[in-house]
Image (cartoon, rainbow, N blue to C red):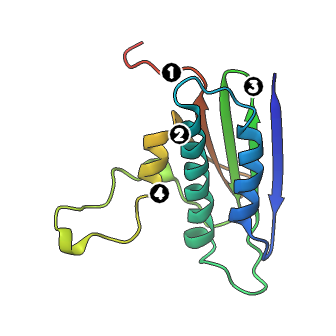
């Protein structure tokens, strides 16, 4: 079985809620082998972090009359769930961000900066490209367990 959901969101719609609900509906069909409930939540969390980063950092947050264009393609091909997020914000390659924020000083732990780290931690693949003036982020989660060293 395969399935696909394609969203094109512009303007002041609630990008996060619409994306979460569409992804949640598709994820109910995907038979993840390892802890399906947690895996589905992790995928939703990673998707929310990626879309939130585009809105907050790429487009500078919600502004009346802004044209916050985001295109989300969710697909399941029987082997993996893939998410492709495209936007027209300034170029930004999240794969170049290394590690999580510094938390050694417990009194100065930053409020944000964990999104990309969370995405890396819960998904199996993250790839970036700049195509036709758009940022294109591709994420994937395998259905079967990913074995280290295999």
Callout 2 touching callout 3 (CB < 8 Å) = no
Q: Position of residue 87 (x, y in %)?
A: 70, 60
Which residue position is annotated with label 3?
Answer: 77
Whichever of callouts 3 and 1 sits on the residue coming sooner in the sequence is: 3
Which residue position is annotated with label 2?
Answer: 38
Could you say which is closer to the camera, residue 44 or residue 77? 44
Which residue position is annotated with label 4?
Answer: 115
C-alpha span from label 2 to label 4: 18 Å
Q: Look at the picture and state if 109 lies above or below 65.
A: above
Could you say which is closer to the camera, residue 54 or residue 42? 42
Residue name at image x 81 percent, y 21 percent: 1
Residue name at image x 75 percent, y 87 percent: 64
C-alpha span from label 1 to label 4: 23 Å
Which residue position is annotated with label 1?
Answer: 145
Q: Position of residue 80 (x, y in %)?
A: 65, 27
Whichever of callouts 2 and 3 sits on the residue coming sooner in the sequence is: 2
Callout 4 touching callout 3 (CB < 8 Å) = no
Question: Element type at marker 1?
Answer: loop
């Amino acid at each position: 079985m395969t399935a696909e959901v394609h969203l094109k969101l512009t303007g002041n719609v609630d990008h996060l809620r619409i994306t979460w609900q569409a992804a949640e509906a598709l994820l109910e069909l995907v038979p993840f082998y390892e802890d399906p409930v947690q895996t589905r939540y992790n995928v939703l969390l990673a998707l929310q972090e990626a879309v939130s980063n585009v809105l907050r950092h790429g487009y500078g947050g919600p502004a009346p009359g802004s044209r916050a264009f985001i295109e989300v393609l969710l697909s399941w091909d029987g082997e993996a769930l893939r998410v492709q997020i495209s936007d027209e914000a300034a170029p930004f390659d999240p794969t170049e961000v290394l590690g999580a924020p510094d938390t050694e000083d417990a009194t100065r732990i930053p409020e944000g900066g964990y999104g990309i780290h969370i995405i890396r931690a819960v998904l199996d693949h993250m790839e970036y490209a700049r195509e036709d003036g758009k940022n294109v982020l591709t994420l994937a989660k395998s259905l079967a367990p990913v074995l280290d060293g295999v």
